[in-house]
Amino acid sequence: MINFIEIVAAPTIRLVTEKGLFGKPYIRLGKLVATVGNSVFQWGGVLGYALAGHPALLGKFCTDVSRNVPLEQFTKELTRTRGLVEKYLAEAEGQEKTFFELYTQREFRELGIDILARGPSNKLDKKIDMVVAWNVISLAFAKGTAFGYHLPAKFKEYWEQEYRMQPHSEWQDARAHGLVLPEVQKTIPLEEAIATMVEMALGWDAKERHRLDMHEIQFLKTLSRR
């Protein structure tokens, strides 16, 4: 069985995964946080934003498919995350409203790394095995989902700020500090991201033998047409 987060994270994981001498995969810490973590945080936000007010449907994408988590339990856990989201936003007050500031820099600070310091930290090259990496990835997705779900207007504000056209020098500086970014910028409207999320969701549902009912499928298709 495949959890939805595995579908979401797969593209960036493929970009940054390396293998050791004995073929054991790992991801370097810098790329784990700045590339995979940052990406799934945003996609989690898109999911939460699109499904704000629909906890039962959201739970189908956020819980482990191998466990039968009751809706009441998931809803309680989701409710508890609102305070954490508000705390993170309060601490980011006055900073530029981007996911780099809200998620990536914060995660690195908690690891004792100043990502913008002159000269990259040696800690960024630390090899992280996939078990630990998935813990980081799952937490990033959960944080993003909570942000989009509880504060959709604020998430939209961050999204639009993130995907504005940035000065070329800032874009190249972000790439120089480890973010895997294309040389040419591309704006991504939130509506386009939701449509992509719906496509991933329906593809996942088909693989997981229709965990969604017809009403939920129709609702998702409606979201992608907005």
Image (cartoon, grey):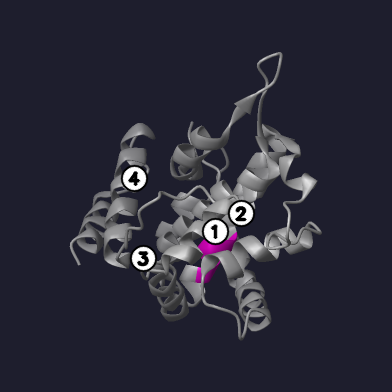
Compute the Cα span from label 2 to label 1. Answer: 5 Å
Disc tally is 4
Q: Which of marks 3 and 1 is nearer the N terminus?
A: 3
| Amino acid type indicated by mark 2 | His
Compute the Cα span from label 3 to label 2. Answer: 31 Å
Residue 177 image label: 2
Q: Which residue is depicted at the point 31% across and 36% down?
A: 206
Q: Which of marks 1 and 4 is in front?
A: 1
The secondary structure type at the circle numbered 1 is helix
Compute the Cα span from label 4 to label 2. Answer: 30 Å
Q: How many residues crowd around disc 4 within 10 Å: few (fewer than 14), some, or many (20 or more)?
A: some
Contact? badges 2 and 1 (CB < 8 Å): yes
Instruction: Kindly report the secondary structure that dominates the magenta region of the rendered protein.
Output: helix
Contact? badges 4 and 2 (CB < 8 Å): no
Q: Residue furthest bottom?
A: 94
Magenta span covers which residues? Answer: 143-147
Image vertical order of residue 137 relative to residue 111, above or below? above
Q: Earlier in the sequence, mark 4 or mark 2?
A: 2
Compute the Cα span from label 1 to label 4. Answer: 28 Å
The secondary structure type at the circle numbered 3 is helix
Q: Which residue is depicted at the point 64% across and 79% down?
A: 92
Q: Residue under label 3, please give it.
A: 50
The secondary structure type at the circle numbered 4 is helix
Q: Which residue is depicted at the point 26% across and 52% down?
A: 217
Q: Nearer the viewer, residue 194 or 69?
A: 194
